[in-house]
Image (cartoon, rainbow, N blue to C red):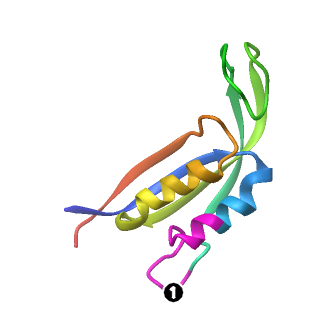
Amino acid sequence: MKCNYFKVEVFIPESALDRLQHELNAVGALTLNGNYDYCMSVTEVTGFWRPLEGAKPFIGSENHISRETELKIEFNCKDEVLKKAIDTIRAYHPYEEPVINVISLWSLD
């Protein structure tokens, strides 16, 4: 068994969706098998966080628990573009510390 694809999950404010989607597609992270691009799913979620002293939050303020509607974006990408996808998320995500979950998808090929 080997890992050919990864599932990537990222939590973002709605205002960042279109730009991040475009930039991820530009590096090939949203392309499946060459026949489709811009492939991703979006789910509305409620995020919680508390910026600690010294943080510079995009939303919220130091030492106060924030509760905001966010979007969870999910996409599968090939192993050869995973690093570009993560670098792109970090470059275009407005949060100081974005949550990025990467899950291996195993193939029997």
| Residue identified by numbered label 1 | 35
Nearest the eye: 15 or 92: 92
Q: Position of residue 54 (x, y in %)?
A: 66, 17
Most extreme residue toward the left, as rendered?
1
Q: Position of residue 32 (x, y in %)?
A: 48, 76
Q: Residue at x 67, y 68 (%)?
A: 22
Image height of 63 relative to 22, above or below = above
Q: Residue at x 57, y 78 (%)?
A: 37
Residue 33 forms part of the magenta stretch: yes
Q: Position of residue 59 (x, y in %)?
A: 78, 32
Residue density around tag 1, few if under 14, some if 14–19, many if 20 or more, within 10 Å: few
- Number of numbered labels in the structure image: 1
Q: Quadrant of residue 73?
A: bottom right
Query: What secondary structure predominates along the stretch shown in magenta?
Result: loop
Q: Is residue 8 left or right of residue 21?
A: left
Q: Position of residue 80 (x, y in %)?
A: 36, 67
Quadrant of the snapshot with the N terminus: bottom left
Image height of 8 relative to 46, above or below = below
Q: Is residue 65 left or right of residue 84?
A: right
Q: Is residue 87 left or right of residue 18?
A: left
Chain part drawn in magenta:
23-36
Q: Residue at x 52, y 70 (%)?
A: 27
Q: Secondary structure at mark 1?
A: loop
Q: Residue at x 57, y 48 (%)?
A: 90
Q: Quadrant of residue 74?
A: bottom right
Q: Is residue 69 left or right of residue 33?
A: right
Type of amino acid under label 1? Asn
Quadrant of the snapshot with the C terminus: bottom left
